Image (tube, grey):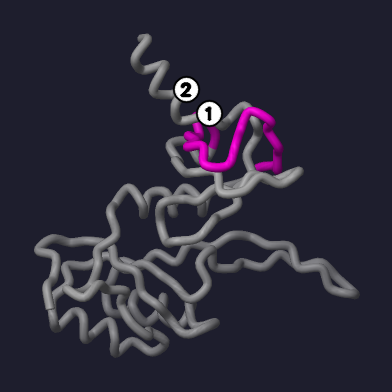
Amino acid sequence: MHYCPEKSWYVLRVRSQAERLVHVGLHHKQFEVLNPTYQALSIRKDRRKVLTRPIFNGYMFVRTLLNPECHLEILKTPGVVEILKSPSGPTPVPDDQVENVRLLEKHVGACFFGTDFEVGDSVFVKEGPLTGLRGVIDRLDRKKLHIHVDAIPGSVMIDVEPHQVQLEKDTVYQLVTK
């Protein structure tokens, strides 16, 4: 099995509803852990409640210099199922992808629909809490723009004001013309 020679981020698959247990367990073992969450409104018959939920159910990130001993220590943590890997060994996640995930965690905004956008367009958030986030439009709805963010495979829906998003090709054009 091949391990990356430097400190990197790795994706952990964890048991359902065990994200908090894994976070605490790895934190006690001195690992740097990222469990991105968002606030969701839960409407019950008698009350409304704001819940904190994970962005990626069943997945977390851990940053470490992975070696066989460290790998085993992570796997012995209650709730951890596996470290995502390829046939050659655990696969590190590039830092820019983890930064995209951190930006998603800070996200606050309203839904929008822009007629200038098409499925497959690369977009760049130019202002607001998601500044620097890059992704590809996966689907357009009447009030939402679904963007595939290069992090964990899947579409992540984000809510931003129309003036905060710019097509990636427009950004490249501005750089060339300046």
* Contact between labelled residues 1 and 2, with CB atoms less than 8 Å apart: yes
Q: Which residue is mark 2?
A: 170
The amino acid type, in three-letter code, at marker 1 is Gln
Tell me which corner region of the image, top left, top right, bottom left or bottom right, holds residue 14.
bottom left
| Residue 17: % across, % down | 54, 82
Q: Nearer the viewer, residue 20 or 6?
A: 6
Q: Which residues are magenta?
A: 109-128
What residue is shown at x 44% (from left), y 61% (from top)? 153
Few, some or many residues within 10 Å of mark 1 (<14, 14–19, 20+): some
Q: Which residue is mark 1?
A: 166
Residue 28 part of the magenta-drawn span: no
The amino acid type, in three-letter code, at marker 2 is Asp
| Residue 68: % across, % down | 13, 81
Tell me which corner region of the image, top left, top right, bottom left or bottom right, holds residue 168.
top left
Q: Is residue 142 left or right of residue 118?
A: right
| Residue 162: % across, % down | 65, 31
